[in-house]
Image: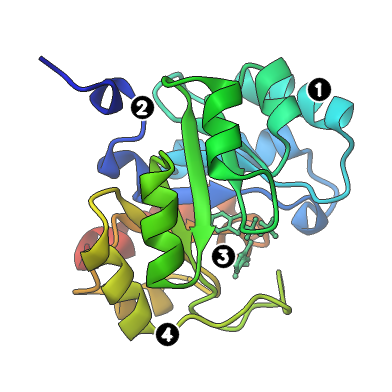
Amino acid sequence: MQSPREYLRCHPEALRLYAVTDASWLGGRTLDECVLEAAEGGATFVQLRDKRASTSDLVEQCGRLRRVIPGDVPFVINDDLEAALVAQADGVHVGQSDAACEEARRVLGPEKIVGVSVQTVDQALAASEAGADYLGVGALFKTATKPEAADVCLATLSDICRSVDIPVVAIGGLNEKTVAALEGTGVAGAAVVSALFAASDIRQAARGLKSAIDRVI
Ligand SMILES: Cc1ncc(COP(=O)(O)OP(=O)(O)O)c(N)n1
Ligand SMILES: Cc1ncsc1CCOP(=O)(O)O
């Protein structure tokens, strides 16, 4: 008999190349075409992250992105629980200062994906206990995408991976070269913004990242 958790679409393999969108890198392209290229290049998971969008904007963007994201690629919305609910996204990703994991789980139900950002082992244990499906840990490296992000060192990342039985993705400054640092940490994958969406050829960038991740994880 499968546990409810096993029905979820958040298998560790799905977290391998986790694409996090950022409208500021589009440079004249539409978000839909950028996400389509990322998926065609091998992105295994997509998070719609737009810190300036209203709930209704996110719902509208989610509807358009759904049409280009393959059905087997999980698609979550950053921060906005209401948008995730209304847009019937596959789930939500919440940070430590967003809606609590328990609240996200209560609102979305047992079959949706709830991802939680953590920076410490204590936060990881709390999120896992509260019903998170996966954890996002970072920033591993300094990044212009979120300069204010707190640093998390590789030793803490490894400790977090060892302390929970849900999959963990690393985030922050990850690119084709820096993902090598993830070897041996226990992560299920890498979450990437600029190394994908700031690239002139997103499809090619996704292929390169996927190969680099496959070499170390
Ligand atoms: C996969 C993943 N991990 C971590 C984060 C960061 O989330 P959060 O702490 O909520 O910060 P913002 O993204 O809201 O700036 C993430 N988005 N995705
Ligand atoms: C959202 C977020 N949280 C921690 S670092 C980060 C941004 C990662 O962006 P990039 O992949 O461009 O370094």
- 3 or 2: mark nearer the eye: 2
- Residue 154: which quarter of the image? bottom left
State the residue lying farthest toward the left: 1
Comes first in the chain, label 4 or label 2? 2
Rendered position, 179 above or below 14: below
- Residue 2: which quarter of the image? top left
Instruction: Report the disc number at residue 153.
Output: 4
Rendered position, 94 above or below 63: below
Comes first in the chain, label 2 or label 1? 2
Q: Secondary structure at mark 3?
A: helix
Q: At label 4, which amino acid type do we have?
A: Cys
**Residue 10: in sight, yes or no?**
yes
Q: Secondary structure at mark 2?
A: loop
Labels 4 & 2 near each other (Cβ < 8 A): no
Name the residue rendered at 55%, 83% in the picture.
Answer: 151
Q: Is mark 1 within 8 Å of ligand 1?
A: no
Assess disc 4: are there few (<14), some (14-19) or many (≥20) residues with their C-alpha within 10 Å of its C-alpha. Answer: some
The residue where tag 2 is placed is 9
Q: At label 2, which amino acid type do we have?
A: Arg
The residue where tag 1 is placed is 60
Labels 2 & 1 near each other (Cβ < 8 A): no
Residue at mark 3 to residue at mark 4: CA–CA distance: 20 Å
Left or right: 90 as drawn, with respect to 111: right
The residue where tag 3 is placed is 195
* Colouring convention used in this rendered image of the protein: rainbow
Left or right: 108 as drawn, with respect to 132: right
